[in-house]
Amino acid sequence: MKNVTILGGGIAGIEAAIYYRKEGFEVELISDRSYLFVYPIAIWIPVHVNRFDDATLSLDRLAARHGFTLTIDRVTAINAATRTVTLQEGGERTIAHLVIAIGAGKMKHEGIAHTLSICGEPEQSLQLKEKIDALIARGSGKIAFGFGGNPNDSSGVRGGPGFELFFNLHHRLKKLGIRENFEMTFFAPMPSPGARMGNKALGMMETMFKRNRFATRYGKKIKRFEAEGIVFEDDTTLPSDLTMFIPAGDGSELIKSSDLPQNAAGFIRIDGHCEIEEVSGWYAIGDATALEGPDWKAKQGHIAEIMARNAAHNSAVSFGLKNEPKKTYHGHLNILCLMDMGNGAGFVYRDDAKARLIPMPLVGHWLKMGWGWYYKLSKMGYIPRLPGL
C-alpha cells in the first residue's frame, strides 16, 4: 500500500487525510494541535452564541473514524533537496510523498500585540470574549474592527470573518439595549474593502453600514497599533478600547526558511494539480500555496478542500491506482460564503461570470448555525457531504 504524510491538522489537512484514505493510501497526519478548529463558526464564541468546544473537533476521533495515523508534533524545518522534514520531538525524517497543509503566516505590523484576531490562534476567540464582556460590564466604549492587505499577494486577505463578528457584536449590543453607548468603526488600508465580492455586494454593505451607524476609516495604511488605538500613515489616530484586526496572510516562517519554490509573499508555488513545482511527489494545498487565477481570487475553506481532494486523486493517478485524468483547482475558483449578521445573513457568490449578494433575513443566521453542525457531522462521516457544502 502507498504511504503519504500530511503536515497540518486544519481544514485542508483533514480533508486530505480523509480523501487519501478513500484512495487507498496509508496516511499519517502531523499536527501541532490535537483538534480541528472550525474557524467559520468561531465568530460566535466572543458573543456567547457558541462555546469554544462547539468550534472544535478532536483529531483523535477523526483519525479513528477514517483510519489514519495521528502524530502530535511541530514541524521545525522542511528541505526539498533532501526530501526531509524535521519535527521538534520526532527528529528528521525522509519523506517521499508529502502534502503540506500548514496554512499561512501573518503580515507583521508594529504593535500587533495590542490587537486580537478572530482568525488568529483559537484561544484569541476566548480573549475577545473576555474583552467584550469587560466593555459590556463598563457600559460604553470605542470598538475598532479591521483587516489588512499584503502587497505581494492579495489572495490572503480575509475580511469576511471581521465583518461577521462586527455585525454580531452590534446585534448583541442592541439586544442588551446599550448599542448607543458604543462607537463602532471598521478600518482597512484599501479604499473599498470587500470589493472582491463584486459591486452589488459592496453597495449593499455600504447601505448596511449607514443604516447601523457604523463609522469607517478606509484607504489609509496602518502605521502601528497602540494600547489606545490605531495610528495611520498620515499620523491620524483611531482611538479604541478594543481592536480586532485580521492581518493578511503571508508565507509562514517555516516555508520562507525552506528551499521550497515560493512567490514574492512566501507562498509555495504549485502547478494546477497541486504538485509543488520541481519537487515531484510533494504537494501543497490550502492557504500555504500561491494560487493562480483572477485578481479577485481569495483563499477560502472550500477551495482548500477541493485542492485536498484533487491532490489525493492526482496522487492515485500518479501511483497507478486509478486510470483517470488528473484534476486541477482552477475551474473551481470562486468566492462563496454565508456572511452571518446575528439576525440574518447574506449569501455571497462570485466567479468570472457573476457576482451576487442575496439577503437572507433571520433564516440565513439559522442556516449558517446549521452548517456548523452539518460540517462536523459530515466530517466524521455520520451524514453524507453534499457537493459544494
Image (cartoon, helix red, strand yellow):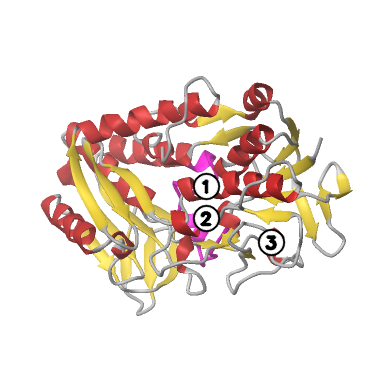
- Horizontal relation, residue 20 to residue 384: left or right: right
How far is disc 1 from disc 3 in space, using C-alphas?
A: 16 Å
How far is disc 2 from disc 1 in space, using C-alphas?
A: 7 Å
Amino acid bearing label 2 = Tyr
User: Which portion, as a residue range, is magenta?
Assistant: 104-124
Looking at the picture, tell me which residue is in the foreground, 257 or 364: 364
Mark 3, residue position: 276
Looking at the picture, tell me which residue is in the foreground, 39 or 174: 39
Q: Please tell me how crowded label 3 is: few (under 14), some (14-19), or many (20+) other residues with Cα within 10 Å.
A: many
- Horizontal relation, residue 202 to residue 149: left or right: left
Mark 1, residue position: 306
Viewer can see residue 268:
yes
Looking at the image, residue 353 lies above or below residue 33:
below
The residue at 39%/77% (across/down) is: 233
Q: Earlier in the sequence, mark 2 or mark 3?
A: 3
Residue 219 locus on image (x, y percent): 31, 73
Looking at the image, residue 264 lies above or below residue 291:
below
Q: Are marks 2 and 1 in contact (CB under 8 Å)?
A: yes
Mark 2, residue position: 329
Amino acid bearing label 1 = Ile
Mark linked to residue 284: none
Residue 15 locus on image (x, y percent): 58, 39
Quarter of the image containing the C terminus?
top left
Residue 294 locus on image (x, y percent): 42, 68
Dot 1: what SS?
helix
Instruction: Inspect the magenta stretch and tell me whether residue 109 lies in it.
Output: yes
The residue at 87%/61% (across/down) is: 82
